[in-house]
Image: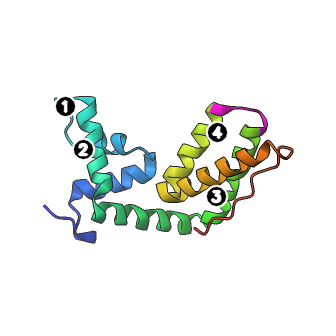
Amino acid sequence: MKAKKNNLTIKQEGFCQDYIRTGNATEAYRLNYSYKNMKESSVNRLAKALIDNIKISSRIDSLRKESSKAFNIDANFMTEKYINALNSAIAEDDYKAQATILDSLSKFLGNSKADEIKIKLLEQKSNEDRNDSLPIQINIDV
């Protein structure tokens, strides 16, 4: 049975909603599809396939935008918060926190934008040997 909105099935729409809520594709899959007789790797693969589906990824992007508007959260504001947290983690040499923040950025901005940040971070880290440890200055159009 098809849901009227976005030509997604009810399960696909539920997956999108739960992905936005949890930030985890595998968890969103488990909440909307039968998985009891599946290996974990199968669940992960099917969740990834849903994320890669253009209709589903478009719906997720749309839900992110709606969510941001509902809470008056600007993507640039959130990115700035992530970058500030990342600067703190770098200053404290907390590599686990750095990885967690970069993972959260990937979920929030999408992988391509997070990859831009990672590249700029690596470029600044390579320049760090020549300069004192400066805060990361990254301007990303979101």
Task: Give the magenta range.
Answer: 91-95
Is 126 above or below relative to 2? above
On screen, residue 49 above or below 56: above
- Give x and y (percent) for residue 3: 21, 65
Circle 2 or circle 4, nearest the eye:
4
Residue 94 in magenta?
yes
Give the residue pinned by disc 2: 46
Q: Secondary structure at mark 4?
A: helix
Residue 11, x across and y down, in percent: 23, 53
57 vs 138, left or right, is left
Q: CA distance from mark 1 to mark 3?
A: 37 Å
Q: Nearer the viewer, residue 105 or 67?
A: 105
Q: Quick one: SS at disc 1?
A: loop
Numbered disc in front, either 1 or 4: 4
SS at badge 3? helix
- The mark found on residue 98 in the picture is 4
Q: Tell me whether the residue at label 1 lies in contact with that at label 2, contact meaning CB atoms closer than 8 angstroms.
A: yes
Residue 61 percent location from the top left of the image: 42, 64
Are there few (<14), some (14-19), or many (20+) residues within 10 Å of tag 4? many
Task: Give the mark, 3 or 4, whose residue is nearer the N terminus.
Answer: 3
Residue at the location (22% across, 58% down)?
10
The residue wearing badge 1 is: 38
How many C-alpha atoms fall within 10 Å of the one at disc 2: few (<14), some, or many (≥20)? some
Task: Specify which label sits upstream in the sequence, 1 or 4.
Answer: 1
Q: CA distance from mark 2 to mark 3?
A: 30 Å
- C-beta proximity under 8 Å, tags 2 and 4: no
Sooner in the amino-acid sequence: mark 2 or mark 3: 2
> Which numbered tag is attached to residue 78?
3
Looking at the rendered structure, the kind of residue marked 2 is Leu
Q: Quadrant of the C terminus?
A: bottom right
